[in-house]
Image (spheres, helix red, strand yellow):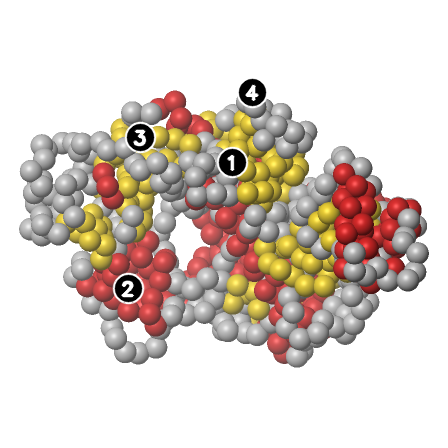
Amino acid sequence: PPPFPTREQILAFVAEATEPVGKREIAKAFGIKGAAKIDLKRILKEIEEDGAVDRGRGGLATAGRLPPVVLTDIRSRDRHGDFLAIPVEWTGTGKPPSIVLTQPRGPRKGNRPAAGIGDRALVRVERDAEGGYTGRVIKVIGKNKAEIIGVYRAGAQGGRIVPVEKRSQGREILIPPGEEGQARDGDLVAVSLERETRFGLPRGRVRERLGSLGSEKAVSLIALHLHNIPHVFSDATLAEADQAEPAALAGREDWRDRPLLTIDPPDAKDHDDAVMAEHDPDPANPGGFILTVAIADVAAYVRPGSSLDREALERGNSVYFPDRVVPMLPERISNDLCSLREGEDRPAIAVRMVITADGEKRRHTFHRVMMRSRAKLAYAQAQAAIDGQPDAATGPLLEPALRPLWTAYAALRAARDRRGPLALDLPERKVLLSPEGAVDRVIVPERLDAHRLIEEFMIQANVAAAETLEAAKQALIYRVHDEPAQEKMQALGEVLASVGIKLPKEGALRPALFNRILGSVAGSEHATFINEVVLRSQAQAVYAAENLGHFGLNLRRYAHFTSPIRRYADLIVHRALITACRLGSDGLPAAVSLGELAQIGEQISAAERRAMAAERETIDRLIAHHLVDRIGATFAGQIAGVTRSGLFIKLDETGADGFVPISQLGADYFRHEEARHALVGERSGETFRLGDRVEVRLVEAAPVAGALRFELLSEGKTRAGSGKDSGGRKPGGRPFKAAPSGRPPGIRNSGTRHRGSRR
């Protein structure tokens, strides 16, 4: 028999192995058989106890080093744009090592999903020349469901984690001594669940310290990490942005003398669209106008395949929180080179549209230009000038620039009314913060004609972009909004029937149908309720390479063109226009296939949904923190959601949503009637329905989770509609019952919508 291997030989074999190794592989390699395996087992145990090797799920590996195949969580990107993964299990000292994932060559095989941030993946790793790790994804296991984001609370013996997700509220995680990493009391941390039993708290260990909740931007920090939103640009991306030079006039039309101006919110930092209107001198178009919409030429700086481009695609869009903006592009691009600043030369792609006196478009052309914004105006400022109160900035612009814009808008508005897009009336609230970052107040901004003017100009420009690209047979990404699904229409019909409105069962679906319904309840007690259920009946708008039309806007073709600073879809459309209209060599690469565009559409649609959820949850947390000192106060509100578990109440004062558990509705047994969006008492007939006005008392606020729990003070309507108490309770109030331990108080909030962002 061969000689028994020495300790050094065994360690060398483990270090050089390209596959996971254990006792069986070592015995086979050295020809160890029979009773000699007992000695091998002993020496392996000694080596392990000495700390020379680590034992993982795949077998043995040199201490402080990863085994050849390891289960990882993909957490971020490096400065070159490559994914970085971290091992799920790490027994070495210090922080677990990062693994740079190399991209496979050639197309992916089969329908195997591509790895992305937030995924858990099996990776084959190798040591590089500098002692680091590179890896190749063998298989994507799924999302990292074992990781929890929470707030660390230090204790005498270890600590505990308070999860930030509502579904995990009331379910703390125990952190044993030594497993807290670098976390300090009050820190936001990522925790890996180690063990969970039927009894007692689940155990975990701190994987990463994400930041202090005492910092200025702690609330949005929670949403960023919870939704895996990239918010730190790589060094390579920042370097590309810093090295970018202002675009030259060569190859562009010189439009610097034209009275283009920007109209934005007063706190806007980037200005990506400018507008102007003039009367058409063509006698064949009496009373007509020439409208111009100029959009920042982001494609001049963000080239396909660059680090800027890769990171913009990963982000998909800018994310807007009350306390910060997470931009799609670095500030050097978004707030400087591509911001249409007043009095400064900026490159743009412009569309020139000729419309008739009644607002119908006759033709349009696209141009690559150099422009100089005449003025930077706020919505209210421009509106005040039109309403007879110009200031020093708007006075000189009133007749030559602003008046033609409003006259042209009147024509577009008439055409819009004839087209009949979906006209939902749901006020949008905006959270205003104090200088310290706390909620100052929640307002409903006034909807001005200045807002509608810019919105209509942008819609017309988006339509022109889609029409041009279709005519050139150029692939693009559409903004599509499908018609409502049949099952949703059936549910809507049942709800409408409960308030005496009949929904036609036959005929093609058109926005006009919904507008007639909304018009019939305008000003009534059912107006908000019906607007809500009509909104819920609609499909979600997405990005796609195939045109399905835009149902809500009642348009056959529609593409996002007007915000390439903050939406990747618009950048794709800009590149497609450059190619289709022969405006330069930096357009959409010919190698980009329809399938790739479809995949990009899916990716940025998911990024948009991710951003919306993060924005909504951040507002929830801010308002919950704002109300934590008002426990016991009463509020007026409206039932905004009905589930079998209870009622969601939207407060009039702040727009925040809170939850009333069904156990607190009284002694009756309440049945959930999904079709009617109602909870109905089995014995009394007392009914709580979506849209009903109610009064509630705040009994609990969880700022970290952004959750509120209410006690319902109002009584439901009986079958007779009297609103009297049929359950034997005293009028004017309800007995309070504590919710069962661990019941998550729910909250939903519509958040803040930004101009033209999600139609």
Q: Nearer the viewer, residue 374 or 239?
A: 239
Q: Which secondary structure lies at badge 3?
A: strand
Mark 1 residue type? Ile
Numbered badge on residue 492: 2
> Mark 4 highlights which residue?
156
Sequence order check: which comes first, mark 3 or mark 2?
Answer: 2
State the separation of the CA atoms marked 3 and 4: 33 Å
Sequence order check: which comes first, mark 1 or mark 4?
Answer: 4
Could you tell me if residue 44 is visible in this image?
no
Q: Which secondary structure lies at badge 4?
A: loop
Sequence order check: which comes first, mark 1 or mark 3?
Answer: 1
Would you say 670 lies left or right of 252 here?
left
Residue 153 in percent (x, y) is at: 54, 26
Q: Nearer the viewer, residue 489 or 403?
A: 489
Q: Residues within 10 Å of mark 3 (few under 14, many from 20)?
A: many
Locate residue 437: give its quadrant: top right
Would you say 747 lies left or right of 718 here?
right
Q: Is residue 689 above or below residue 387?
A: below
Q: Residues within 10 Å of mark 4 (few under 14, many from 20)?
A: few
Question: What residue do we see at 62% from left, 60% from top?
Answer: 141
Mark 2 residue type? Leu
Sequence order check: which comes first, mark 1 or mark 2?
Answer: 1
> Mark 3 highlights which residue?
698
State the separation of the CA atoms marked 3 and 2: 32 Å
State the separation of the CA atoms marked 1 and 2: 42 Å
Mark 3 residue type? Leu
> Mark 1 highlights which residue?
173
Residue 236 in percent (x, y) is at: 82, 48
Q: Residues within 10 Å of mark 2 (few under 14, many from 20)?
A: many
Mark 4 residue type? Ala
